[in-house]
Image: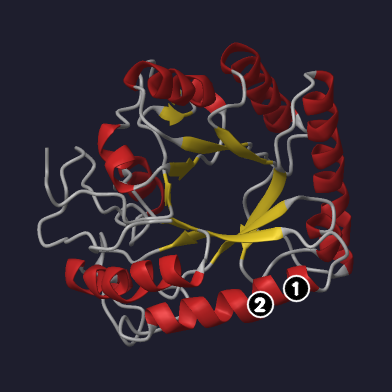
Amino acid sequence: MDSNLHQAFYGMAYTPVGSQLPNCGNSLPLLTDVGRLSQRIRLYGADCNQSALVLEAIKQTKVDMTVWLGNYPIATDNGTAYQRQRDEIKAAIQTYGTTNIGGYVTQNGATDPNSAVGNTGAQILLADIQDTRSMLQALSVNIPVGNADAGSYFNNEVLAAVDYGMANVHPWFANVSADSSAGWTAQFFQQQDVALAGTLTNKPTMYIAETGWPTKSSDAGNASNGPSTASVANLQIFLNTFVCQANTNGTGYFFFEFADEDWKDQEFGGVEGWWGLFNQDRTLKSGITVPTCQSP
């Protein structure tokens, strides 16, 4: 057991290997190391039976872990992906119950906020949210239903219809320096997302869905965001200045992310596949030290 691993993180963004269509795997996710970092993980989708596989892994390993399940729809497929994943999640709930489920995210990705286009898109999401609630009600279970989006792209109608919002807040993509990244993340989240939630009658709980720092780029053109580079040293700066401070001030966040994702690098290039604390082979990256604080 690596003595450097302990539960310093409120939550961890987690994508099981073999959870992307059409290259599904059937192996149980290896939750031991991620469970040493956090008691909470969030998933992005439900394809490839990942909801059931994660819950089965929790059951078999007896790890103390709560998972936020995800449904990642495709806006242009007339609901096919949403319905397919909804049914996967429904089956997982029927099999494993809700003891280890912290929430159900009905959407991931960005919509144009509060414009005519955004409000039109919001109607699709609102229908999905209502359908999700109806499905859960039919199962006689009570799970918080949320919406995930980019931190500056929440639609008011959608956020007013959910129990919680999950905001992607990335200093890298905002061209913020590594030294300023933690302070910027906290300020942006409070001013852009927490403040918006406070204006709504339902007062949804707000989480940071993703925040982190990439450790490399597959090409030189994306190796810098302007003031800082993608590197292990700069990820360590963000770890040192964000994690314990966020734990202390009560911010709910899911650190992005547990391990590198080869499929993202192959599909998108640049920094997309290189945000992990761990390498793709689930070894801790050389030079990374987990902060010494304890997560709430």
Left or right relative to 70: residue 67: left
Vertical placement of residue 79 versus 259, above or below? above
Residue at 32% over, 76% down: 241
Tell me residue 164's x, y (percent).
Answer: 70, 53
* Residue 193 visible at all: yes
Left or right relative to 279: residue 40: right
For residue 93, which quarter of the picture?
A: top right
* Residue 27 visible at all: no
Specify few, some or many for label 2: CA neighbours under 10 Å numbering under 14, 14-19, or 20 or more.
some
Colouring chosen for the image of the structure: secondary structure
Residue at 74% over, 41% down: 76
Tell me residue 202's x, y (percent).
Answer: 84, 59
- Give the quadrant of the N terminus: top left
User: What residue would you read off at disc 2?
Assistant: 192
Q: CA distance from mark 2 to mark 1?
A: 6 Å
* Residue contact at pointers 2 and 1, CB within 8 angstroms: yes
> Helix, strand or loop at disc 2?
helix
> Helix, strand or loop at disc 1?
helix
Vertical placement of residue 105 versus 288, above or below? above
Tell me residue 114's x, y (percent).
Answer: 83, 69
Q: Hey, what amino acid is under mark 2?
A: Gln
User: What residue would you read off at disc 1?
Assistant: 196
Tell me residue 284's x, y (percent).
Answer: 16, 48
Q: Hey, what amino acid is under mark 1?
A: Leu
| Residue at the extreme top | 95
Q: Nearer the viewer, residue 144 or 238?
A: 144
Q: Nearer the viewer, residue 175 or 242?
A: 242
Specify few, some or many for label 1: CA neighbours under 10 Å numbering under 14, 14-19, or 20 or more.
some
